[in-house]
Image: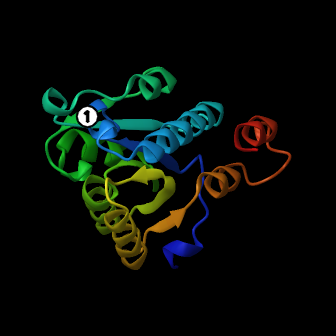
Amino acid sequence: MSQALSIASAEKGVLMVVDIQDRLLSAMPQEQQQQIQKTMQTLLAAADALALPVLVTEQYPKGLGHTVAGIQEALPANTPTFEKTHFSAWQVDAIADALKQSGYQQVFLSGMETHICVLQTALDLLKQGFEVFVIEEAVCSRDNKNYLNALTRLREAGAVITNIESLLFECIGDARHPQFKTISKLII
């Protein structure tokens, strides 16, 4: 089955927040800084409402700082944060082990930069058999050409390029879902 035919599932998935850190965020164009922070606030509130597990990565935090405060504060309690120097989160044994042992089949990717850490993480996850959903407005790069190139490459590699609204409504699947009103208020 083509990955593009996959439906996102809160029961099968995990949200990975890749490297949304102080120094990386400040290098992004102002409009992207605002968009990703707003999108992540919504996404994390939805993850909490849906009991969707969240993993956070930080690329070399000694040099790039930690996860930005607004996002850190929105994380569900007990969200694990993994430090890394590899661009691909999969190359960090603790992250790979956590994903292997979890039974998750789907990974919902957000973060920065799209053409470096998000791309390499997604490619490695695809090679490992995960269904990868890249949330288009929850990833960014300093240069829009790099962002667009990475999304094209990810789509061609088999990742599902989606948006926050599609992802969340796929996760609830039905207007009778107990969190339908909560998710609707977050999105609309």
Query: Residue visible at 26% across and 53% down?
Result: 117
Residue 149 vertical placement versus 38 (above, below): below
Quadrant hosting residue 119: bottom left
Residue 40 vertical placement versus 62 (above, below): below
Answer left or right for 41 relative to 148. Answer: right
Crowding at label 1, few (<14), some or many (≥20) Cα neighbours within 10 Å?
some
Query: Residue visible at 49% across and 37% down?
Result: 37
Q: Which residue is mark 1?
A: 23
Residue 108 vertical placement versus 41 (above, below): below
Which one is nearer the viewer's eye here, 85 or 14?
85
Residue 177 coordinates in the image, percent (x, y): 79, 43
Query: Residue visible at 76% across and 34% down?
Result: 182
Q: Is residue 15 visible?
A: no
Answer left or right for 107 relative to 141. Answer: right
What amino acid type should be assigned to the residue bearing mark 1? Arg
Quadrant hosting residue 17: top left
Which one is nearer the viewer's eye here, 128 or 18?
18
Residue 98 coordinates in the image, percent (x, y): 31, 40
Q: How many numbered dots are placed on residues in this image?
A: 1
Could you tell me which secondary element the residue under label 1 belongs to? helix
Which one is nearer the viewer's eye here, 32 or 7?
32
Residue 38 coordinates in the image, percent (x, y): 55, 37
Q: Is residue 151 visible?
A: yes
